[in-house]
Image (spheres, rainbow, N blue to C red):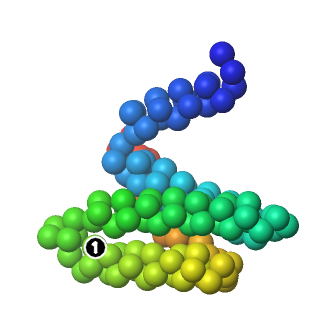
């Protein structure tokens, strides 16, 4: 079995056995990875492949951010969920602008924000596992 197939099987198993909190972390990691790949696309010299790489990866990151936004519990999440909703809207807007203008700066802004949220989320998950043990 090729290595790529092993990786896909591992990823599928990880998703199937993950807690909801871990799935959120995986989504954030996926969005960050797509944005990093989009930024790397700016280094491609050939015009068409550069535009395609940037566009596809930003669309992927936006789809993941929409999924994160849709997962918010606006009724039970109170002010936190409402603020995250607005923050996800801002991130989606910035990525859209980055894609339209083919500008890496808005991507860097979203990466910074999402990285901070991701790190806080990971810390919270670690803390809850430690406290549960």
x and y percentages locating residue 107 in the rendered image: 61, 76
Residue at position x 61%, y 57% in the image: 33
Q: Quadrant of residue 34?
A: bottom right
59 versus 93 height, above or below: above
Q: Which quarter shows the C terminus?
A: top left
Residue at position x 55%, y 56% in the image: 29
Foreground of the two, 92 or 125:
92
Q: Is residue 112 visible?
A: no
Q: Is residue 52 left or right of residue 89?
A: right
x and y percentages locating residue 32 in the rendered image: 58, 62
Question: Which residue was labeled with disc 1?
Answer: 81
Label 1: few (<14), some or many (≥20) within 10 Å? Answer: some
Foreground of the two, 60 or 18:
60
Q: Which quarter shows the N terminus?
A: top right
Q: Residue furthest right?
A: 45
Determine whether the residue tagged by mark 1 lies in a helix, strand or loop: helix
Q: Residue furthest top?
A: 1
Q: Is residue 37 visible?
A: yes
Foreground of the two, 64 or 27:
64
Q: Residue furthest front?
A: 48
x and y percentages locating residue 9 in the rendered image: 53, 27
Numbered circles on residues, count: 1
Q: Quadrant of residue 48?
A: bottom right
25 versus 50 height, above or below: above
Residue at position x 36%, y 59% in the image: 67
Residue at position x 67%, y 81% in the image: 103
x and y percentages locating residue 112 in the rendered image: 60, 75
Foreground of the two, 62 or 70:
62
């Amino acid at each position: 079995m090729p290595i790529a197939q092993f990786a896909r099987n591992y990823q599928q198993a990880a998703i199937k056995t993950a807690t909801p909190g871990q799935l959120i972390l995986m989504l954030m990691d996926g969005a960050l990875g797509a944005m990093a790949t989009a930024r790397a696309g700016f280094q491609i010299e050939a015009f068409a492949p550069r535009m395609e790489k940037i566009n596809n990866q930003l669309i992927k990151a936006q789809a993941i951010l929409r999924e994160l936004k849709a997962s918010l519990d606006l009724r039970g999440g109170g002010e936190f969920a409402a603020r995250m909703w607005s923050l996800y809207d801002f991130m989606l807007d910035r990525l859209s602008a980055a894609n339209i203008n083919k500008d890496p700066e808005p991507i860097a802004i979203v990466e910074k924000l999402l990285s901070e949220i991701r790190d806080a989320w990971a810390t919270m998950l670690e803390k809850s596992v430690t406290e549960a043990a």
